[in-house]
């Protein structure tokens, strides 16, 4: 019986929040309510609704377009519309624009020179040093391996490259 009473008291003990913690939590709730009220105001304002729709359309166009000149003009227009929305208290969603590869052409001589200077280097390290990515470096490295100029040790991301 005494054991049950001890367990009951252990379960009942809890840490109480301080006044500052409770105030901070309530202030966070107030800020959330204010943000929701602003969002409702934006939904009701037709001009802001049209600007938001234009911003979404530009985002869709940016994700599909290939022409660099058009893409730069659209990104400038997106910046202007985002600024307009932020002036009215709206925070537009940031869109992630995929980055292009750093360099599609990797020089085999530079790759070979780096492996000679840094034996045992991993592909990611080599790519970072040459200012490219591993995907564009891979075909050139395979050619060097096939020509028996470079040998490998390890597998996958742990693969190390050595000069033959």
Image: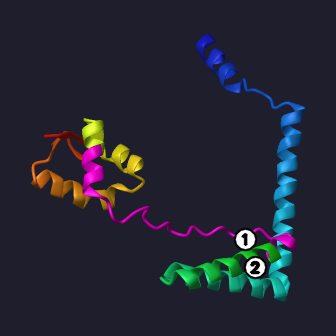
Classify mark 2: residues with Cα within 10 Å, few (<14), some (14-19) or many (20+).
some
Residue at 55% across, 70% down: 97
Badge 2 vs badge 1, beta-carbon distance below 8 Å: yes
The residue labelled by disc 2 is 81
Give the CA distance from mark 2 to mark 1.
9 Å
Can you identify the residue that label 1 sits on? Answer: 92
- Observer able to see residue 157: no
**Element on which disc 2 rests:** helix
For the C terminus, give its image quadrant. top left
Q: Position of residue 143 (x, y in %)?
A: 16, 58
Vertical order, 124 against 83 (above or below)? above
Magenta stretch: dominant secondary structure = loop
- Please identify the residue farthest to the top as the structure is shown: 2
Examine the structure image and report whether residue 56 is included in the region drawn in magenta: no
Label 1 crowd bin: few (<14), some (14–19), many (20+), radius 10 Å: some
Q: Is residue 50 left or right of residue 20?
A: left
- In percent of width and height, residue 1 lies at 60, 13
In the image, 41 versus 76, the foreground residue is 76
Residue interval drawn in magenta? 85-113
């Amino acid at each position: 019986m005494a054991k049950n009473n001890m367990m009951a008291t252990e379960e009942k003990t809890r840490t109480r929040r301080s006044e500052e913690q409770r105030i901070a939590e309530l202030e966070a709730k107030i800020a959330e309510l204010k943000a929701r009220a602003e969002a409702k105001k934006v939904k009701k304002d037709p001009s802001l609704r049209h600007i938001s729709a234009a911003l979404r359309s530009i985002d869709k166009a940016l994700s599909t377009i290939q022409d660099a000149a058009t893409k730069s003009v659209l990104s400038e227009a997106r910046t202007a519309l985002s600024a307009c929305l932020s002036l009215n208290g709206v925070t537009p969603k940031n869109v992630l624009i995929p980055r292009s590869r750093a360099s599609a052409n990797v020089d085999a001589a530079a790759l070979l020179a780096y492996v000679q200077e840094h034996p045992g280097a991993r592909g990611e390290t080599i790519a970072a040093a040459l200012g490219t990515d591993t995907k564009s470096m891979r075909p050139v490295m395979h050619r060097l391996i096939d020509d028996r100029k470079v040998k490998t040790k390890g597998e996958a991301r742990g693969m190390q490259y050595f000069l033959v």
